Image (tube, rainbow, N blue to C red):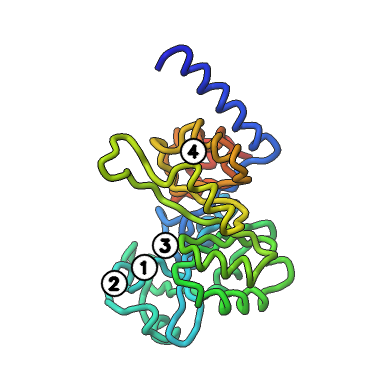
Amino acid sequence: MSIHHSIKHLLVMAALSQACLARDPLITGHRGASATAPENTLAAFRQAWSDGADAIEGDFRLTADGALVCIHDADTKRVTGHDRVVAACTLAELKQLDFGAWKDQRFQGESCPTFAEVCSTLPPAGRFFVELKAGPEIVPPLAAAIHRQPPGVAKRLLIIAFDADTVLACKKTLPAVPVHWLTAFRKRPKAVGAWEPTAAAIAATVRRLGTDGVGLQANRQVLTPQFLQHLKAAGVGEFHVWTVDDSDAAHYFLTAGAMGITTNRPAVVRASLGLR
């Protein structure tokens, strides 16, 4: 890297870091403290809070009888050993499966929690990133589940989703709850070194969907200081990144002004950043 580019890099990072001077980013437990405990279980979420996480992130799908349950995959094979499609099971049927023993026998008996059960783990100041893994049909049950929670819980939620129609439904049905559109990155076919979506495309999608920000796959080949500066200049107010377990990467995104850093190892990342 030339001296000119080094100076430019430092200036851009200094400009971006102004966004994080007012507060530290939310260290968010990805599916709970999923490096330690079985993902998306109450054990993982409680471990994340014990590890000092500011927030937790969980994935939600609908059961056949309309329950909102916390599981990443469309089926239960990976985390239970039983190949059952979540959308074809009732809540009672899912509750009969063991979602913990695959990780370690000491977690045997962990079940697939509901939205309400995950909310019950929230400490007074804890935030909750609710990732929706279904289409717009999941939004009315989510809205009903949120309305059944104690006053104040809704203000601590951030809804996140890849599906544009789901995001739009959230903004229409739950206007008071912030929403981030999620995006990963892929290399463009036959374009050396080029990735999509571009910063301009992300900003255009955020504007079209009316979201409060964007959740970005933490690909540092893409998320250069210049890329993030372009996002900011295009009006993207805030961003969070996923999934960051490396201390150097966590420090990079801290400096870049991420409002949240999602990690499988919240205790390790918090300690490496020297956060209070």
Question: Badge 3: how crowded within 10 Å, few (<14), some, or many (20+)?
Answer: many
Determine the secondary structure under disc 1. loop
Q: Is label 3 or label 2 in front?
A: 2
Q: Quadrant of the C terminus?
A: top right
Q: Is label 1 or label 3 in front?
A: 1
Disc 1 and disc 3: Cα gap in Å?
11 Å
Task: Find out whether the residues at labels 1 and 4 contact each other: C-beta distance under 8 Å.
Answer: no
Residue type beneath disc 4: Ala
Q: Which residue is drawn at 49% across and 61% down?
A: 161
Disc 3 and disc 2: Cα gap in Å?
14 Å
Residue type beneath disc 2: Lys
Question: Badge 4: how crowded within 10 Å, few (<14), some, or many (20+)?
Answer: many
Q: Mark 4 points at which residue?
A: 250
Residue type beneath disc 1: Asp
Q: Residue at x 56, y 34 (%)?
A: 229
Q: In this view, does 98 lie above or below 43?
A: below
Q: In this view, does 241 lie above or below 128?
A: above
Determine the secondary structure under disc 2. helix
Q: Name the residue under label 2.
A: 77
Disc 2 and disc 4: Cα gap in Å?
32 Å
Q: Mark 3 points at which residue?
A: 39
Foreground pick, 246 / 103 = 246
Disc 4 and disc 3: Cα gap in Å?
21 Å
Q: Which residue is drawn at 34% across and 62% down?
A: 103
Task: Find out whether the residues at labels 1 and 2 contact each other: C-beta distance under 8 Å.
Answer: yes
Foreground pick, 135 / 29 = 135
Q: Earlier in the sequence, mark 1 or mark 4?
A: 1
Which disc is residue 88 wearing? none
Q: Mark 1 points at which residue?
A: 73
